[in-house]
Image: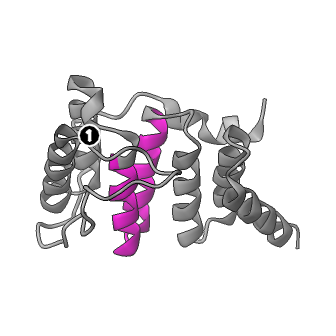
């Protein structure tokens, strides 16, 4: 069995329901989850622009994130995903996760990216994103594994390959 499968295998489990999640001590005074507009132009590597349903879903998840914290926000994501998966594109949790990283909320970003991996396990972008979050949190081995998985899924992910190789070199010393 490949090492990344052992590491990421638990990520593909069904999401924890809100009732099973630990209480979150965040308050409603947190900054908004997103400061970036969702209707931006696309590049060759980006996914298409979000639909109005995705914009609405992001706003709902951001509201829950601000008022209740990351675990209820992820539960809201899964509720919306189950209702209409087109309203919860891969880019939605990636944007929220990177917004959390910008706020230095690394653990919350990792939680968002883990949910994205569970929803889109064959996307190289979700593994690169979690690699970025783990690296920001100082978890070099986990970051390397995320970057390696991204590069395995898509050989054109040269940034992921380069970062994985660099982390490998540092981890050996």
Please, what is the dominant secondary structure of the magenta stretch? helix
The quadrant of the rendering that contains the C terminus is bottom right
Between 125 and 139, the one nearer to me in the picture: 125
Image check: 28 left or right of 124?
A: left
The residue at 21%/49% (across/down) is 58
The residue at 37%/33% (across/down) is 15
The residue at 25%/55% (across/down) is 39
Looking at the picture, how far across and down is residue 13, in whole percent? 47, 29
Q: Is residue 16 magenta?
A: no
Residue at the spot of label 1: 77
Image check: 60 left or right of 22?
A: left
Between 91 and 165, the one nearer to me in the picture: 91
Looking at the picture, how far across and down is residue 136, in whole percent? 54, 71
The quadrant of the rendering that contains the N terminus is top right
Q: Is residue 137 visible?
A: no
User: Which stretch did the figure color magenta?
Assistant: 92-118
Dot 1 surroundings within 10 Å: few (below 14), some, or many (20 or more)? many
């Amino acid at each position: 069995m490949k090492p990344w499968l052992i590491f990421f295998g638990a990520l593909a489990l069904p999401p924890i329901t809100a009732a099973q999640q630990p209480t979150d001590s965040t308050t409603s005074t947190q900054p908004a989850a997103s400061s970036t507009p969702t209707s931006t132009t696309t590049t060759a590597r980006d996914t298409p622009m979000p639909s109005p349903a995705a914009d609405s879903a992001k706003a709902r998840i951001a509201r829950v994130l601000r008022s209740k914290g990351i675990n209820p926000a992820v539960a809201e994501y899964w509720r919306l995903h189950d209702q209409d998966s087109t309203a919860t594109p891969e880019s939605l949790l990636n944007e929220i996760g990177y917004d959390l990283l910008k706020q230095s909320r690394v653990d919350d970003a990792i939680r968002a990216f883990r949910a994205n991996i569970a929803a889109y396990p064959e996307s190289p972008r979700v593994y690169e994103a979690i690699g970025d979050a783990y690296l920001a949190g100082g978890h070099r081995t986990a970051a390397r594994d995320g970057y390696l998985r991204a590069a395995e899924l898509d050989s054109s992910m040269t940034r992921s390959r380069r970062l994985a190789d660099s982390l490998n070199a540092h981890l050996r010393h």
